[in-house]
Image (tube, helix red, strand yellow):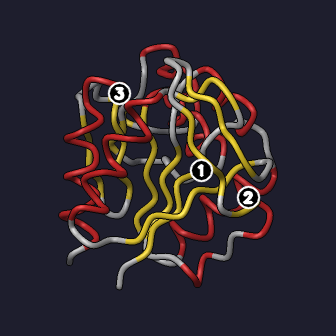
Amino acid sequence: MKKTVFVVAPEIFRDEEYFDPKQVLEYAGIEVITASLKLGELKGKLGRNTTADILLKDVKEKDFDAIIYVGGGGASVYFDNADALKLAKEFFTAGKITASICIAGVILANAGILKGKKATAFIDGKDTLLKGGADFTGKAVEIDGNIITANGPAAAGDFGKAILERIKL
């Protein structure tokens, strides 16, 4: 069974950006594990909550087929988080799906893995992606090798489908 890890902020994560791709993947039989800076309840911006299964510092690249960074204002806690950046590099280097939606694209840029890659993010993250060497496209969903990025909540379902298509390869 394929297994993914979603990296979610303890609070103010964007509900659709977590729940929509998660539903797409789980419906297809992909196991979804949720990681955060704390165990227990995580609070979405729009009022939906979820539960962290594992601490981010305990995530091991070898245990998963993909890592997905969820956006929303709370994602800023990961912009310079050593564990978040290290994991992005490890998954990318291992050729595994490394994905982000909305402002979480800043994490991939700060990890140094977007150099020369087509990528998208919420418009607030555009400058950081450009500084990180990305070819910012502004598309709803962008796929460049094992990097999958999306620009925000409206793209969440298609983001999940893009991850599913790549994980099945």
| Residue 11, image x, y percentages | 68, 29
The amino acid beneath tag 3 is Asn
Question: Residue at position x 50%, y 29% from top?
Answer: 48
Q: Are marks 1 and 2 in contact (CB under 8 Å)?
A: yes
| Residue 59, image x, y percentages | 69, 69
Q: Nearer the viewer, mark 2 or mark 3?
A: 2
Q: Nearer the viewer, mark 1 or mark 3?
A: 1
N-terminal of the two: label 1 or label 2? 1
N-terminal of the two: label 1 or label 3? 1
Question: Residue at position x 40%, y 65% from top?
Answer: 97
- Distance between the Cα atoms at labels 2 and 3? 23 Å
Which quarter of the image is occupied by the C terminus? bottom left
| Residue 16, image x, y percentages | 38, 31
Residue 131 in the image: above or below residue 33 = above
The amino acid beneath tag 1 is Val
User: Callout 2: helix, strand or loop?
Assistant: helix
Q: Name the image quarter holding residue 13.
A: top right
Q: Are marks 1 and 3 in contact (CB under 8 Å)?
A: no
Residue 64 in the image: above or below residue 49 = below
| Residue 103, image x, y percentages | 52, 27
Q: Which residue is mark 3?
A: 151
Q: Which residue is mark 2?
A: 56
Q: Which residue is mark 1?
A: 7
User: 73 or 128: nearer the eye?
Assistant: 73
Q: Pointer 2: residues within 10 angstroms few (<14), some, or many (20+)?
A: many
- Distance between the Cα atoms at labels 1 and 2? 7 Å
Question: Residue at position x 54%, y 72% from top?
Answer: 93
Q: Pointer 3: residues within 10 angstroms few (<14), some, or many (20+)?
A: many
The amino acid beneath tag 2 is Leu
User: 63 or 98: nearer the eye?
Assistant: 63
